[in-house]
Image (cartoon, rainbow, N blue to C red):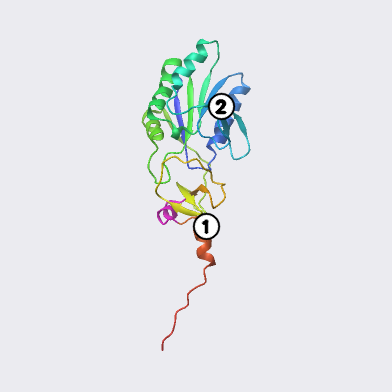
Amino acid sequence: MPELAFFSGTMDCGKSTLALQIAHNRDARGLQGVIFTRDDRAGEGKLSSRLGLVTDAVEAPEGMDLYAYLVAELSAGGRADYVIVDEAQFLAPAQIDQLARIVDDLGLDVFAFGITTDFRTKLFPGSQRLIELADRLEQLQVEALCWCGARATHNARTIGGEMVVEGAQVVVGDVNRPAEEIGYEVLCRRHHRRRMTSAAARAGALSPDVLPVNHA
């Protein structure tokens, strides 16, 4: 039976790499897929991983009807045996409903990949709708690590290496941006709560110890 599967995890845990691997495995068996993405780090109409792999994709901007796109492609003689959606957290809830319709009405497997919560630990609307509708939820087993070595569970937005907790929910960035730019870092819950990024930890480690003063 076709299914809507949602693969989730923090940033830097291999979601896009797995999406590319799934596409490769099916293509090797003679299947053809349609890949949707939004705001990929490699630019518009691309699906890329931090390992350097990249492939062409269909950019899915706000307001695009994904179901109607597939129907138009198939009606024009195109072929689609499966669908992959990367950066699914950026999709609107209505677009997630369209993915479910692709599964139910067109009989295609849909594999969606995304992060569940934003830098404020709030659910992305697209991810929330996927959790509500998906036939299968998969937590990626490749664990991203906090700077302290613990399992990273939260995404932090940084400016100049300092964590921020206010701003628009979607600001395109990456975990490898220069410190002075808007970037992201994965943290364990403890250090996310304390707003302690790797830069803050280094600064603390470099600060001279304050010795007790004896007034006697």
**Residue 175 in the image, given as x and y percentages of width and height:** 54, 46
| Quarter-of-image position of residue 46 | top right
Which amino acid, by three-letter code, is at mark 2?
Ala
Q: Which residues are magenta?
A: 187-195
Label 2 SS: loop
Which amino acid, by three-letter code, is at mark 1?
Ala
| Quarter-of-image position of residue 170 | top left
Q: Earlier in the sequence, mark 1 or mark 2?
A: 2
Task: Look at 49% across and 59% down and name the residue there.
Answer: 200
Disc 1 and disc 2 in contact, CB within 8 angstroms? no
Residue tagged 1:
199
Nearest the camera: 25 or 114? Answer: 114
Q: Is residue 3 above or below residue 163?
A: above
Which labelled disc corresponds to residue 57? Answer: 2
The answer to whether residue 151 is visible is: no
Q: Is residue 74 above or below residue 148?
A: above
Nearest the camera: 203 or 104? Answer: 203
Task: Look at 48% across and 24% down and name the residue there.
Answer: 110
Nearest the camera: 59 or 83? Answer: 59
Label 1 SS: helix
Residue 25 is left or right of residue 117, and the answer is right
C-alpha separation, residue under disc 1 versus residue under disc 2: 35 Å
